[in-house]
Amino acid sequence: LKRVRPLQCQRRMFLAALILAFKYSQDRNYSLSTWAVISGLCSEEIKLNEAVFLTMVDWHLYIPHAVFERWASEV
């Protein structure tokens, strides 16, 4: 089985961001095994991807409204 480095795979980082956003915003969440079925990744890989993503954003999952507005105006 070939190991993929999470930061080199946009799909894995997107999935990590999606899972973390869902966990952050919802009181009820899917289990890790459900995320594995949905994503096609194993549970260990999902946990690794989440840890890498959280490290890269310095554990800051909240974006202040002013920052969001600035980025939204660029898109």
Image (cartoon, rainbow, N blue to C red):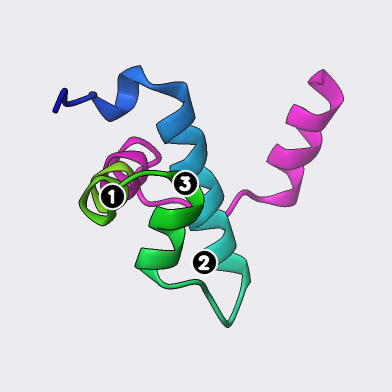
Q: Looking at the picture, how far across and down is residue 19, in whole percent?
A: 50, 54
Given residues 39 and 17, the one toward you in this image is 39
Q: Which of marks 1 and 2 is in front?
A: 1
Task: Tell me which segment is drawn in magenta.
Answer: 50-75
Given residues 23 and 44, the one toward you in this image is 44
Crowding at label 3, few (<14), some or many (≥20) Cα neighbours within 10 Å?
some
Q: Name the residue under label 1.
A: 42
Query: Label 3 sits on what residue type?
Result: Ser
Q: Does the magenta stretch include residue 70?
A: yes
Q: Residue at x 48, y 28 (%)?
A: 11
In-image side of 28 versus 64 (left or right): left
Residues at marks 3 and 2 touching, judged by CB atoms closer than 8 Å = no
Query: Label 2 sits on what residue type?
Result: Lys
Answer with the quarter of the image where residue 7 lies: top left
Q: Label 3 to label 2, Cα distance in Å?
A: 15 Å
In-image side of 44 versus 68 (left or right): left
Q: Name the residue under label 2.
A: 23
In-image side of 71 versus 44 (left or right): right
Q: Name the residue under label 3.
A: 39
Q: Residue at x 40, y 40 (%)?
A: 57
Query: Label 1 sits on what residue type?
Result: Cys
Q: Which comes sooner in the sequence, label 1 or label 2?
A: 2
Which element is circle 3 on?
A: helix
Crowding at label 1, few (<14), some or many (≥20) Cα neighbours within 10 Å?
few
Residues at marks 1 and 2 touching, judged by CB atoms closer than 8 Å = no
Q: Label 1 to label 2, Cα distance in Å?
A: 18 Å
